[in-house]
Image (cartoon, helix red, strand yellow):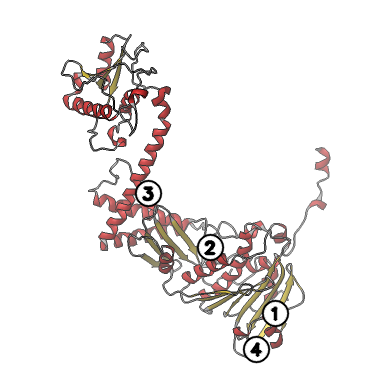
Amino acid sequence: MAKQISDYTASQIQVLEGLEPVRKRPGMYIGSTDSRGLHECLREIVDNSVDESFAGVADKVWVRVESDGSITVRDNGRGIPVDIHSSGVSALEITMTKLHAGGKFGGGAYKVSGGLHGVGASVVNALSSYFRVVVLRGNKAYYQEYKRGNPDKRVSETTQEQLDKWFPKSWGIKINADLTGTITTFVPDKTIFTTTEYDNIKIKSLLRDRAYLVSKLFFNFLDERTNESACYYFEGGIKSLVSHTNRGKNTLSDVIHISKQEEVLNCEIALQYNDSINENVKGYVNGINTVDGGTHITGFRMALTRSIIDYAKKLKGGDEKNGNGNLLTGEDLREGLTAVVYIKMPSETLQFESQTKAKLNNPEVLGFVSSTVKEGLDTYFEEHPSDAKTIVEKVMLAAKARMAARAAKDAVLRKGALDGASLPGKLADCQSRDAAISELYIVEGDSAGGSAKQGRDRRFQAILPLGGKILNTERNQRSHSCPRRRNRGVVKLREDQIPKGYHYDRRRRRRRTYKNTSSYFFLSTHAGSNFKRIFIYSASTAFQNSGRKKYQLCILGGRKGWHSE
C-alpha cells in the first residue's frame, strides 16, 4: 500500500483535451451507448433545428436515413455562422469541436431553446466515425468534414456539383438561390455504440412529438433503405397530441386545455381522462421530452390532486372520502389520465439534471405550473359540471378498486390465521382443545369482557370482546360486513364468511380441532337486541349457505336464535 501511494505523482494526472472526454466517457453525455444513446444523438441534432423554429426563422426540418447507414438532418434556419471567431478559428469549427461552445449561453441568439450546455452537436461529432456539416448562408455554401471529432481541414466553400452529389435533387439546394439553413450528416461510430441501426418507429415518434409541440413546423422523414416516408404537421399543438394518444379509447370528456404566459415563463397543459387504468403523462421543456419528469410534472400533479379533491368535497357535501371511509390518493386520481405539460422558458435559466435533459430541476417552475393548473381546472369544473362529475366518479371508482385489491391482499395474508396460525388478541381462550365442549362468549366492549372473564369456567369457556356494531350483511360486501379491525376476530374464530362452494363440515374449526360434532356459540344479552339479530342473521345465513345445519347458535338468557339438526 505504501508503494502505491509513493508512486502517485504528477505524471499520473491526465488532462483530456477537446472532445476526448466524450469518447472516453460517452455515457456522461448521451446516457448510454446502446440504442437509446444512438437515438439521443439524433435528438440532439433535430433539437438544434427545432431551436431555429423557436427563434422564428425555420418552418421545415428534413430527416433522411441514407442507404449507407448515415443520417442527415436539414433545416431552413439561419445557418451556423462561419466567419472567424475572436479565437482565430471559424465559428462553425468551434461549435462542432469544442464542448460548451454555442449561441445559447448569452440568450441573444436564442431566447427559447432546448440546449443550454453547448455540447449537443460537438458530442455527436465526437461519437461519429464521419461527420459533415454544410451551411447555406449569404448565397453561398460552406462545409467542413470530421472524423471522430477531428476536422479534416478548415471550413471551406463548396460547389454546386458537390451539393448535387451529397443531397437529393428534390431538396432543390442551389447556390445563389437565397437559401439558408444547416445540413448535418453523420455516421455513428461502431467502436462506441453497441448498435448503429436506427429504429424508424423511434425516429418518427420523435418527429411527431416535435411537430405537436411546435405548431406549424413541418417535418419530412425518408428512409432510403426501405423507401419508408412520413410527414408531420399539426396546428392543434399539444391538444392534438393528447387526442392522438387517446385514439381508440373511451374518453370521459373533451381535451381540457390550460395555458398561461408571463414575462419569462410560458406554461401550456392539455389533459383528458379515459376509462382505462393506465396513466400517460408527458413533460416537455422547450421542446425537450423530460422522460423522468421534474418540477413541472410535480406541480401539475399537486394541482390536479387539489382540484379534484376540492370538487369531490363539493359533490359529497364537504367530505373528500370515497364512501369506504378512506381518503383519495394521487394514485386514484391518475388512473386513466393522459396529459401533456409543456414549459417554455429562457434557455440560460434552464436547470436539467444532466446533459440528457431527462429531468427538470427549476424550483420556480413548480409553483408556476401548480397555480396555473389549479386555477384552470377549477374554472373548467365550474363551467362543465357534467364532465367534472364524470371525472370524480371515475376517481371514486378507482379508489374503491384500490381498496378492494388491498382487502383481497389482506385476506390472502390472513389465510394462515384462519387455518390456525393465530387467534384474535382480545380473545381470552379456554383450556380445552375439544370442539365438542368448548364455548365462545361474545360480549360488547372491554368492560363487559372483564366481568365475563371473572365468571367463566376457563376450562371450556372463551370470551371475545367486540367493539362497535356489526353491520347487516344482507346486501353488504364482505369487506364492509366487519369494518372494525377488532371485530374481525369473530371471522377468524367462527369462519362466518364462507365462500361459494365452501363445505363447512370439512373445514369447521374451534381452536385447532376439526370435527363434525355440534358446537355452541353464545352472545351476551348486554350486547343489545339489534346486535344479536344482525349477528344471528349473519351466522345463520353463512351456515345455511354452507350446506350444514347441525350447528347451534344460542342466546344466553334469551330465545334460541337458530337451531336445526
The residue type indicated by label 2 comes to Leu
Mark 1 Cα shell of 10 Å, populated few (<14), some (14-19), many (≥20)? many
The residue type indicated by label 4 comes to Ile
For the residues labelled 3 and 4, the Cα–Cα distance comes to: 60 Å
Rendered image: mark on residue 350: 2
The residue type indicated by label 1 comes to Tyr
SS category of the residue bearing label 1: strand
Q: Note whether residue 116 is visible.
A: yes
Q: Position of residue 148 (x, y in %)?
A: 74, 67
Rendered image: mark on residue 175: 4
SS category of the residue bearing label 4: loop
Say if 260 sits above or below 416 in the image.
Answer: below
Compare marks 3 and 4 and give the one earlier in the sequence. 4
- The mark closer to the camera, 2 or 1, is 1
For the residues labelled 3 and 2, the Cα–Cα distance comes to: 32 Å
Mark 4 Cα shell of 10 Å, populated few (<14), some (14-19), many (≥20)? some
For the residues labelled 3 and 1, the Cα–Cα distance comes to: 56 Å
- The residue at which mark 3 appears reads as 332
Compare marks 4 and 2 and give the one earlier in the sequence. 4
SS category of the residue bearing label 2: loop
Compare marks 2 and 1 and give the one earlier in the sequence. 1
> Residue 164 is drawn in which quadrant?
bottom right
SS category of the residue bearing label 3: helix
Q: Position of residue 261 (x, y in %)?
A: 41, 68
Compare marks 3 and 1 and give the one earlier in the sequence. 1
For the residues labelled 4 and 2, the Cα–Cα distance comes to: 38 Å
